[in-house]
Amino acid sequence: MKRLLALGVVVLPWKIKRWALRRFWGYRIADGARIGLAYVFPGELVMHEGARIDHFTVAIHLDRMECGAQSYIGRSNWITGHPGHGEHFRHRAERDPALVLGEHSAITKQHTIDCTDRIEIGPFTTIAGYGSQLITHGIDVFRNLQDCKPIRIGAYCLVGTRVTVLGGAVLPDRTVLGAGSLLNKAHTEEYVVYAGQPAKKVKNLDPAGAYFHRERGFVH
């Protein structure tokens, strides 16, 4: 019944939709936040002032989703996970099926984001281009079970088009991940470009670069 109600809510004018999402789902949505024609129904939703989710994005089967002030999720993104119950991942008691976007962060178009475990995207970071995959879960062939690890992408990062980021990966603050790269482990050094399959440091960056000192998020 609630799924049918959700489908009806999706097409409502925004002011009525916002009221329904607050009233029936208990979502915390700031007056200046907005969701387009999108199916966004995580367990818990927090949208701070100025946060936006554009048309045709789907966000389901995750426990929590928080969109920082002035953050942006573009069109046709698929955001999903595995909620905190069921047969899988019982050995991961600390698992947090959540997507957390920092203030002024941006996810552009047509990305796949698997929040079986927590994905954190820092303030002023851009997941750019198209067709990237952030995947927190996979099969552990040694133990023959589904396993997962969180992903952290730092602040003021630029993530290129068509990358793959796997569970356990960390992209440090103020770094660039080159187009087509595979990020599969935790890195620590800032102000560098990581690129390749798997990604490794390929270039230093000037700390004075304007991108790393922006006061507004999405670069137009």
Image (cartoon, rainbow, N blue to C red):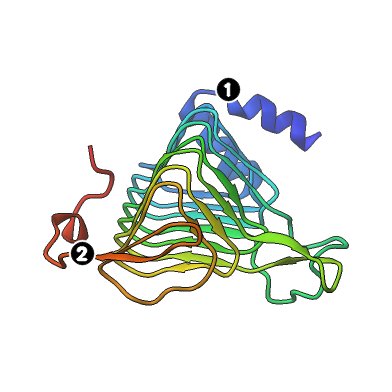
Q: Nearer the viewer, residue 213 or 25?
A: 213
Q: Residue at x 72, y 60 (%)?
A: 138
Q: Residue at x 45, y 47 (%)?
A: 180
Residue 62 at x, y percent in the picture: 66, 53
Q: Is residue 13 left or right of residue 5?
A: left
Tell me the kind of residue under disc 1.
Answer: Val
Q: Which residue is mark 2?
A: 205
For residue 120, the mark is none
In the image, is residue 48 above or below residue 39?
below
Q: Nearer the viewer, residue 168 or 20?
A: 168
Quadrant assignment, res 3? top right
* Element type where label 1 sits in the image: loop
Q: Nearer the viewer, residue 202 or 115?
A: 202
Q: Is residue 50 left or right of residue 75?
A: left
In the image, is residue 54 above or below residue 82?
above
Residue 159 at x, y percent in the picture: 38, 52
Residue 23 at x, y percent in the picture: 60, 43
2 or 1: mark nearer the eye? 2
Q: Is residue 205 left or right of residue 19?
A: left
Mark 2 or mark 1, earlier in chain: 1
Q: Which residue is mark 1?
A: 11
